[in-house]
Amino acid sequence: MARQTDLIAPSILSANFARLGEEVDNVIMSGADIVHFDVMDNHYVPNLTIGPLVCEALRKHGVTADIDVHLMVKPVDRIIPDFAEAGASYISFHPEASEHIDRTLQMIREYDCKAGLVFNPATPLDVLEYVMDKVDLILLMSVNPGFGGQSFIPSTLNKLRQVRKMIDDSGYNIRLEVDGGVKVTNVQEIKEAGADMFVAGSAIFGAAEEHDKNHYNSIIGAFRGQLVMAKV
Ligand code: DX5
Ligand code: ZN
């Protein structure tokens, strides 16, 4: 099956939260494809971020791009309807945070969202074998979840190759996303290892003084340039 088009997904975790609507408008206008929305609960991960109210506020502000909700919360099921109603496009969760993975995946699709499973750097892929028909997205963490600005863990490249093969063998249309430490300097090899959806937080939103359209245009253009050069 032909590889799907690349999607660049800025993680708003590194955006200026006081101007979030404008920040999202600017990265989308600068060529980003989808908004990566990191939800942390200070329980599953040691940090606390944003919930359905903020997702809904972005929709009301006029954001029409897909919103890719990455749940780092435990338990998972209670919050799914809230995110679906708030306008989420994708909802993904960590398998160890749900007692009933198959049920949670089905629930996400019942709410008309695309369903994703997220694997931490040391989490094995075994549950995937039984649910390939129920996932629209597989997200490999290339850092331990909880914070932006960490370094890419190189063993993710082999894991990406492994999952790429599983997806291709399955014949299903499943996105392969990578999250953590993705930069202009490593995105080409990440794509070559099999990813087709690239989260970047600190690399795109950068330092405080760089939060403007010109910066986003050039950095997203640089990402795109590297992706085009990848040999797949
Ligand atoms: C980490 C989050 C990531 C994070 C990526 O738990 O899931 O989305 O924001 O940030 P960078 O790109 O800075 O590593
Ligand atoms: Zn994330």
Image (tube, grey):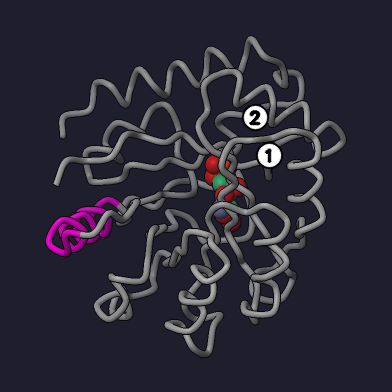
Where's the C terminus, which quadrant?
top left
SS class, disc 2: helix
The image quarter containing residue 19 is top right
Image position of 165 (left or right of 187):
left
Three-letter code for the amino acid on which mark 1 is drawn = Ser
Q: Position of residue 99 (x, y in %)?
A: 53, 90
Vertical side of 16 occupied by 101: above or below: below
Circle 2 packing at 10 Å, graded few (<14), some (14-19), many (20+), is: many
Which percent across, then down, holds residue 161? 20, 54
Residue underneath mark 2: 205
Horizontal side of 82 relative to 160 (left or right) equals right
**As drawn, 22 above or below 199:** above
Query: Magenta segment, which residues?
Result: 157-171
At 62% across and 54% down in the image, what residue appears?
A: 88
In the image, what residue type sits under mark 2? Phe
Point 79% across, 50% down: residue: 54
- x and y percentages locating residue 44 in the rendered image: 64, 75
**Viewer-side residue, 90 vs 201:** 90
| Residue depicted at 38% across the width and 59% down the height | 136
